[in-house]
Amino acid sequence: MFKGIRPIRYAGREVLPLIEGGKGVSATNHASSGAWAAAGGIGTVSAVNADSYDPEGKIIPQIYHALTRRDRHEELINYAIEGASEQVRRAFEMTGGKGAININVLWEMGGAQRILHGVLERTRGMVAGVTCGAGMPYKLSEITASYGVNYLPIISSARAFSALWKRAYSKFADFLAAVVYEDPWLAGGHNGLSNAEDPLQPQDPYPRVKALRETMRQGGISDDVPIVMAGGVWNLKEWEDWIDNPELGQIAFQFGTRPLLTKESPIPEEWKQRLMTLEEGDVLLHRFSPTGFYSSAVRTPFLRNLEARSHRQIAFTKEPIGDHSFELDVGIGNKKNHWVTRGDLLHAREWFAQGFTEALKTPDETLVFVTPDEKKIIRKDQADCMGCLSQCAFSSWADNEKNTTGRLADPRSFCIQRRCRTSPTAARSTRI
Ligand SMILES: Cc1cc2nc3c(=O)[nH]c(=O)nc-3n(C[C@H](O)[C@H](O)[C@H](O)COP(=O)(O)O)c2cc1C
Ligand code: SF4
């Protein structure tokens, strides 16, 4: 017989240990998280560039007026604080002021700390906890504790948690509400694969979560503090061994992809339909994200285009070295001194003949071949950047003094903001 789950105490209330994971951009909002929390679980509003509304209830388009990236970044922070606060208010209201509403921030998003302060300031008494991953959010505990709010770090290994705990979180132990183990092979969205882990060699989550519990115990954390299993959770029957298992302590489950199919889910209807028709091989763990993290996504035409772009790639040297003894004569205008192998010269001429007439430099001493139209879009997206990430591979924006990563902008990647907000078939969907 199926064991089933029992309610737990969370942020002063009784809830089912079932969480709807936060999903940016606007793939979880008040409608989905409010409904989830109203049904007794923990809902998560994504605070990554959430939508706000005009007095008639229409979504306010996030248009950027400033001329510089730095100033547009300020506009973005204001939109983000306003949007997330409004989503929290609406979600909280949907639960009659009783439900458990978390917010989710990405530590690597531009202005993460300011946005977190801004939202927590405006939503006092409404947010039960803050889930946060993507990077090493050492400051997370200090910030949320200063508002009396719980924090739930998202990690992909016991090692990452140990570093966070020792350096920062142990000082705010009372506010640690749970630790989210997001499996780097199974979870939708961005994935925290380390350099030592092979994207093509998935590991069993059980020993990894067991190791996490052992690390938590070593840090003096009670077994009542849940570990939230996130990634590949579809039917709880498949996780029966995990429930009431003394080796693992209290377990909760986070669902990301599955709730995309609910009627409350704010993603476009066509995408819900598409998700129902996926077949083996339709989901790709890729590296095109400008964040630099792996990302798990449906192979949309947009993603296939990025794959094809990366295939139309050749290495070059600035002088003839070894078999790089053929000078490139297509895609680079009048520029000289791009030395390639004979095979790559022939490839480049072939792509050129097919209409991929523009060669763009990457930060890795390679060239990718694109059409003139693609080049225009890439350059425009890079020029229009509003600094939504702390480090962006695509535009080389960085949230630092000089506002640059110091690396060449990478045309193999894409702008999450532009490609997310302008078309449902673009990046918003590439993360599904
Ligand atoms: C479309 C999509 C967007 C996501 N965006 C975020 C995000 O912005 N921040 C985050 O911490 N997790 C994000 N996630 C991860 C989910 O919160 C959740 O942990 C994960 O999807 C669980 O794995 P599952 O998809 O196999 O259920 C996203 C997942 C999906 C599918
Ligand atoms: S170019 Fe990069 S940092 Fe700039 S808005 Fe797009 S994804 Fe964000």
Image (cartoon, rainbow, N blue to C red):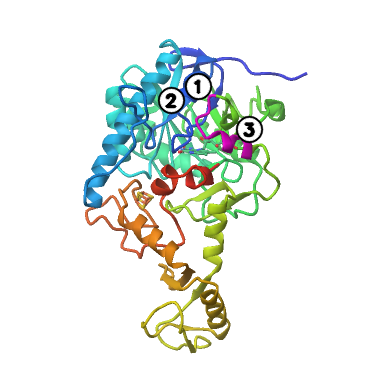
In the rendering, which numbered label is found on residue 233?
A: 3
If the image is split into quadrants, where does the C terminus sit?
A: top right
Q: Are marks 3 and 2 in contact (CB under 8 Å)?
A: no
Q: What is the x, y in percent for residue 190?
A: 50, 45
Tell me which numbered mark, 1 or 2, is placed earlier along the sequence.
1
| Quadrant assignment, res 56 | top left
Region in magenta:
264-274
Magenta segment includes 49: no
Q: Are marks 1 and 2 in contact (CB under 8 Å)?
A: yes
Q: Is the CB atom of the residue marked by disc 3 within 8 angstroms of ligand 1's nearest atom?
A: yes
Residue behind mark 1: 42
Tell me the crowding category of disc 2: few under 14, some 14 to 19, or many 20 or more residues within 10 angstroms, Cα based. many
Cα distance in 3D space between marks 1 and 2:
7 Å
Q: Amino acid at mark 1?
A: Ile
Depth check: give the residue in front, 426 or 365. Answer: 426
Tell me which numbered mark, 3 or 2, is placed earlier along the sequence.
2
Q: Amino acid at mark 2?
A: Asn
Q: Amino acid at mark 3?
A: Val
Residue at position x 35%, y 47% in the image: 389
Q: Is the CB atom of the residue marked by disc 2 within 8 angstroms of ligand 1's nearest atom?
A: no
| Quadrant assignment, res 126 | top left
Q: What is the x, y in percent for residue 89?
A: 36, 20
Q: Is residue 174 visible?
A: no
Residue at position x 44%, y 11% in the image: 98
